[in-house]
Amino acid sequence: MVSARAIAETVTDPELPMLTLAELGVLRDVTEDTGRVEVTITPTYTGCPALDTMRADLRSRLADAGYTDVQVRTVLHPPWTTDWISDAGRRKLHEAGIAPPGAAPHRPSGPIPLSLGPTRRVRCPRCGSADTVELSRFGATACKSLRRCDACREPFEHFKEI
């Protein structure tokens, strides 16, 4: 029988089907103990609308492989960060025309400094230019923004740093 972890690592994200939950960093742990499987996931954000689908897909894929006692736990602490996206996941985002996120912003305790200018230049995944503008803070999903490259004039999505 294929390990529960190996199976769980093949389940794709419903909103980013080019990525597995493991590549996205949502899949945190898989444990097996005498026929019982516990999968731990951390959603990209608390109100993620794909969370129920992720749980159902994990249960279904594991059941298809013969695992009948499956529990999917959601853990919100520590909160998910874009730093958890694997290098393979970032490459796949880029290949799909989505600008991968940069490093997650450092969140110090205490007062948060105000930044009035752009904190990071987002490069176009098609031509590589940093001459891009944000068209909408939200794209097809809340974790992406819609941008346009002023060099090649192509619109693209950017996976926001969280």
Image (cartoon, rainbow, N blue to C red):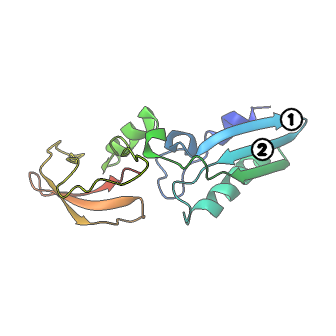
Horizontal arrangement in the rendering, residue 80 relative to residue 71 (left or right): left
User: Residue 71 in the image: x percent, y percent?
Assistant: 79, 51
User: Residue 24 in the image: x percent, y percent?
Assistant: 50, 44
Q: Quadrant of the N terminus?
A: top right
Furthest-right residue in view?
34
Horizontal arrangement in the rendering, residue 77 relative to residue 2 (left or right): left
Which quadrant holds residue 22?
A: top right
Give the Cα separation between the discs numbered 2 and 1.
9 Å
Amino acid type indicated by mark 1: Asp
Q: Secondary structure at mark 1?
A: strand
Q: Which residue is mark 1?
A: 33
**Pick the front one: 6 or 115:** 115
Horizontal arrangement in the rendering, residue 153 relative to residue 40 (left or right): left
Horizontal arrangement in the rendering, residue 17 relative to residue 41 (left or right): left
Furthest-front residue in view?
110
Q: Tell me whether circle 2 and circle 1 mark residues in contact (CB < 8 Å).
A: yes
Q: Residues within 10 Å of mark 1 (few under 14, many from 20)?
A: few
Amino acid type indicated by mark 2: Glu
Q: Which residue is mark 2?
A: 38
Task: Establish if 91 lies above or below 51.
Answer: above
Q: Residues within 10 Å of mark 2 (few under 14, many from 20)?
A: some
Q: Secondary structure at mark 2?
A: strand
User: Residue 48 in the image: x percent, y percent?
Assistant: 54, 63
Residue placed at 42% from the left, 64% from the top?
142
